[in-house]
Image (cartoon, grey):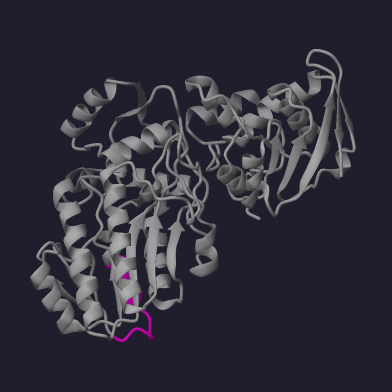
């Protein structure tokens, strides 16, 4: 519940009359004020503490969003460890209380992989062959959740999000695009889609209170290309190819925006998926357009320092 | 059918021509629609409009191309990309829709340009996704494995006669 997405989901759940109690745990505190939700500060990688807390709470529904992107809010190793340990601990402990009726896990369209051997716009039934550590992490979380759901005989929804961006959501893609000079692929300009944080939060709430089951892609309308996304923010795209990526990666990391493998894959091979099922099973309509969501990423960049604002 | 939706630009139906200077300015600022298959509908129009006016095409039965919804136009002759382009231009003039050619060269720059102009890869799952999104697919060199992707969608056979610089005739079947 500590991330931008988790906090927003908690706020939306709080506002619903049909939700009795909202309880969250995370390694980071919530990012906004919560009114009736309670929160426990716990490291998701601490399996025993997580299991004990979950047993204590005995939830009816688990929404497991602790699948962070590498360099999103934590280092790649910590993010992967939290996803791996946290998923098993939370869902297994919740299932053992026998009250659990539904599980929702956060996954990503990174599970499909990209490139020649993969479909361009995969639907939910496409083979899952991730080509990046984050994709494998998402797939592992899904597999654990589906396996535990089968044993317990309860529905499990895996929300496969396109890269989640918003003006306040920390994401490696958003940070990269906000650099003044951004590396793009020299000989391809493949399409990618993103999903706005607000739409992602609404998808989680719809999955928690609805009756969906199985994997669902949650993808913003339309697409953009890396070159175009950089220009939408008024930044300068720099074409990079072959070994140039190693140098570009080192430079962006120095500039405070490391490029994890799944973002590199997005820049070189694109990343989209067919999001039409979400409209049917989650009732999600009027999602933000990819280019509108990207435009919001850039709005945050021009933060005016207080002193300069006072002078002006 | 999800055809409209990219900043008011209908990604399926041909739009009004735009002044070149205005178009270049918008392109430099990144303000143009792109669909999930990587097609740039306004660039498609900008190329298809002059190409359709200079190529000598006789279209027979153009009214049989549906004005909305998914359809596969299957070219009977297997002569490759020239026939597919002729059918795509026929769709542009007769039905005012942006046809999507299935199959493009897997080369660095040329492939990317073909994708921008609306081509998709020759894969059954990509063809199925294209049709689910409600587009017109032109299949010129289709084998059975590819056409599995068209299962459940209308397929119209198309005959092309004549060779490129000369006069060509595109006949739409039923």
Q: Where is residue A190 in the image (x, y as percent from the top left)?
A: 46, 34
Q: Name the one closer to the observer, B170 or A290.
A: B170
Q: Toward the viewer: A123 or B88? A: A123
Quarter of the image where the N terminus of chain B is located: bottom right
Q: Is A256 on the left or on the right of B147, as rendered? A: left
Q: Is residue A261 above or below residue A136?
A: above
Q: Is residue A18 covered in magenta? A: yes
Quarter of the view holding residue A23: bottom left
Looking at the image, which residue sits at the far top? B165
Considering depth in this image, is A155 or A172 the residue closer to the camera?
A155
Q: Which quadrant is home to the C terminus of chain B?
A: top right
Residue B28 seen from this side: yes
Q: Does residue B154 lie above or below A227 as drawn?
A: below
Query: Is residue A100 rendered to the left or right of residue A192?
Result: left
Residue A145, percent from left and from top = 30, 66
Q: Position of residue B163 (x, y in %)?
A: 81, 16
Q: In this view, does B160 lie above or below A222?
A: above
At x 34%, y 83%, the residue is A19
Is B115 a magenta residue? no
Residue B18 in view (yes/no): no
Q: Which residue lies furthest to the front in this view?
A: B144
Point 33% across, 73% down: residue: A149
- Number of callouts: 0
Magenta region, residue range: A7-20
From what the image shows, is residue A202 above or below residue B163? below
Task: Identify the residue at image location x=47%, y=21%.
Answer: B108
Residue B54: x %, y % from top left: 79, 18
């Amino acid at each position: 519940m500590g991330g931008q997405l988790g906090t927003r989901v908690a706020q939306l759940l709080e506002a619903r009359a049909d939700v009795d109690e909202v309880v969250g745990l995370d390694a980071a505190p919530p990012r906004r004020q919560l009114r009736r939700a309670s929160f426990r500060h716990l490291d998701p990688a601490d399996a025993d503490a997580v299991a004990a807390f979950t047993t204590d709470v005995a939830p009816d529904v688990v929404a497991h969003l602790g699948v962070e992107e590498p360099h999103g809010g934590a280092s790649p190793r910590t993010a992967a460890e939290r996803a791996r340990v946290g998923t098993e601990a939370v869902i297994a402990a919740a299932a053992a209380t026998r009250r659990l009726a539904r599980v929702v896990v956060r996954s990503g369209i990174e599970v499909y992989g990209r490139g020649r051997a993969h479909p361009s716009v995969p639907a939910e039934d496409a083979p899952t062959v991730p080509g990046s550590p984050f994709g494998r992490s998402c797939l592992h979380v899904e597999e654990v959740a589906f396996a535990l759901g089968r044993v317990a005989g309860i529905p499990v929804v895996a929300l496969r999000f396109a890269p989640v961006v918003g003006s306040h959501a920390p994401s490696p893609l958003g940070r990269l695009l906000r650099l003044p000079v951004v590396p793009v692929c020299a000989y391809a300009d493949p399409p990618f889609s993103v999903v706005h944080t607000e739409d992602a939060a609404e998808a989680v709430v719809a999955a928690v209170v609805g009756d969906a089951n199985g994997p669902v892609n949650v993808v913003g309308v339309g697409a953009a290309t890396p070159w175009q996304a950089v220009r939408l923010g008024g930044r300068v795209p720099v074409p990079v190819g072959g070994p140039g990526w190693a140098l570009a990666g080192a430079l962006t990391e120095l500039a405070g925006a490391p490029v994890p493998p799944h973002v590199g894959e997005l820049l070189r091979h694109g990343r989209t998926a067919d999001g039409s099922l979400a409209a049917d099973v989650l009732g999600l309509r009027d999602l933000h357009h990819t280019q509108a969501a990207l435009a919001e990423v850039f709005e945050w960049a021009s933060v005016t320092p207080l002193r300069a604002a006072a002078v002006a | 059918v999800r055809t409209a939706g990219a900043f008011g630009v209908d990604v399926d139906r041909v739009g009004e021509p735009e002044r070149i200077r205005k178009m270049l300015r918008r392109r430099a600022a990144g303000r143009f629609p792109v669909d999930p298959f990587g097609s740039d509908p306004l660039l498609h129009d900008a190329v298809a409009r002059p190409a359709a006016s200079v190529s000598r095409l006789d279209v027979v039965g153009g009214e049989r191309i549906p004005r909305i919804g998914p359809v596969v136009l299957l070219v009977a002759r297997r002569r490759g990309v020239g026939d597919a382009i002729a059918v795509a231009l026929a769709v542009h003039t007769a039905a005012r829709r942006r046809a999507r050619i299935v199959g493009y060269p897997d080369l660095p720059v040329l492939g990317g340009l073909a994708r921008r102009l609306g081509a998709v890869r020759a894969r059954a799952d990509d063809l199925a996704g294209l049709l689910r999104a409600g587009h017109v697919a032109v299949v010129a060199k289709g084998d059975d494995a590819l056409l599995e992707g068209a299962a459940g969608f209308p397929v119209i056979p198309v005959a092309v006669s004549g060779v490129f610089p000369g006069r060509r005739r595109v006949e739409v079947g039923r």
